[in-house]
């Protein structure tokens, strides 16, 4: 399935220097769990699995991945304690890589804060960033990316299905099957490009691209903050990836949560 991926990256990717290793797994509970259990966690290691049995989404949701039908990938990033630009940009640049990937397959993806990727208002990809904050130790972020590629409508009706946003896939949108290897190639290539922008301290390019593809810019959204429902206009995002929400002429900064549909 991914037999030529590493060679293609070595031969053609402009930003391949970031890639330390690509680990292929037949089956794993979760590529994020696998990355979290690695010791040491080396930057530039990508883990890609044919299938996951316990894929994890944000807010303790289950993430459904199927062999031949889903991309399940995690990447390890290290960062110094007082990183500048802030590590929260990693989550935004990961969404940018997914946007690039889907656009190159003739889709018109949009990003929904914090980092869901939608096509025609349905969720096609998700990103789960997990990090440690241990004092005096090497810090890392695990970026887990799941893309629904060849899943059909029936595949989403599995046991335990619980979708905050109704799901879709590349095959549902394009009415044809796609090569997982082609998509994984573009995803890793683009991820390395955006990491390059991050490392050369270019946060504005990362944020601008994200905002250009933002589903909710200047729209009214509702969000739960500290158990309170806030409704306001989604104005912008900060360099830390926080949502700037205008609520009755006041500005609220939202750093976690989920937009209600
Ligand atoms: C979400 O939108 O809730 C995030 C979904 C993230 C899913 C990916 S699949 C690869 C990696 N391994 C996991 O267990 N989760 C992420």
Image (cartoon, rainbow, N blue to C red):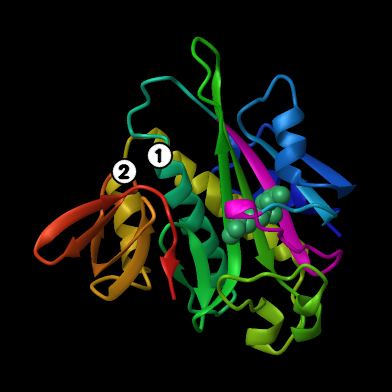
Quarter of the figure with residue 86: top left
Q: Single out the residue that lies furthest toward the bottom.
A: 175
Disc 1 and disc 2: Cα gap in Å? Answer: 6 Å
Q: Single out the residue that lies furthest toward the left.
A: 249
The residue under label 1 is 198
Residue 158 vs residue 105, the one in the foreground: 158
The residue under label 2 is 203
Residue 238 within the segment the image draws in magenta = no
Q: Is residue 151 visible?
A: no
**Residue 151: image location, x then y, percent:** 77, 76
Element carrying mark 2: helix
Quarter holding ligand 1: bottom right
Q: Is residue 196 left or right of residue 125?
A: left
Which residues fall within the magenta stretch?
A: 57-77
Q: Is residue 159 left or right of residue 241?
A: right
Tell me which residue sits at (34%, 48%) in the image: 241
**Residue 163: image location, x then y, percent:** 63, 71
Quarter of the figure with residue 230: bottom left
Residue 86 vs residue 105, the one in the foreground: 86
Give the vertical position of 183 relative to 103 (above or below).
above
Q: Disc 1 vs disc 2: Cβ atoms closer than 8 Å? A: yes
Tell me which residue sits at (75%, 77%) in the image: 156
Q: Single out the residue that lies furthest toward the top.
A: 136
Classify the position of the N terminus by image quarter: bottom right
Local crowd size for mark 1, using a 10 Å CA cut-off: few (<14), some (14–19), many (≥20): many
Tell me which residue sits at (85%, 54%) in the image: 53
**Residue 203: image location, x then y, percent:** 31, 43
Residue 12 vs residue 79, the one in the foreground: 79
Question: Reading the chain from its start, which is encountered first: label 1 or label 2?
Answer: 1
Classify the position of the C terminus by image quarter: bottom left
Element carrying mark 1: helix
């Amino acid at each position: 399935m991914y037999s030529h991926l590493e060679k293609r990256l070595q031969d053609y990717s402009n930003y391949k220097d970031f890639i330390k290793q690509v680990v292929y797994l037949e089956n794993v509970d979760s590529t994020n769990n696998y990355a979290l259990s690695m010791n040491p966690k080396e930057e530039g290691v990508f883990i890609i699995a044919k299938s996951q049995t316990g894929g994890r989404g944000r807010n303790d949701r289950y993430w459904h991945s199927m062999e031949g039908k889903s991309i399940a990938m995690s990447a390890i990033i290290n960062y110094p304690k007082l990183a500048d630009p802030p590590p929260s940009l990693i989550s935004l640049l990961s969404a940018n890589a997914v946007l690039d990937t889907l656009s190159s397959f003739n889709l018109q993806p949009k990003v929904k804060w914090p980092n869901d990727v939608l096509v025609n208002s349905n969720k096609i990809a998700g990103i789960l960033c997990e990090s440690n904050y241990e004092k005096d130790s090497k810090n890392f972020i695990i970026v887990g990316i799941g893309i629904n590629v060849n899943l059909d409508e029936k595949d989403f009706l599995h046991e335990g299905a619980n979708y905050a946003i109704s799901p879709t896939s590349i095959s549902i949108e394009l009415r044809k099957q796609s090569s997982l290897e082609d998509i994984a190639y573009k995803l890793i290539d683009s991820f390395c490009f955006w990491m390059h922008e991050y490392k050369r301290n270019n946060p504005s390019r990362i944020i601008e691209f994200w905002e250009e593809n933002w589903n909710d810019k200047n729209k009214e959204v509702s969000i739960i903050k500290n158990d309170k429902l806030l409704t306001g206009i989604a104005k912008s995002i900060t360099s830390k990836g926080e949502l700037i929400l205008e609520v009755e002429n006041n500005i609220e900064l939202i750093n976690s949560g989920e937009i209600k549909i």
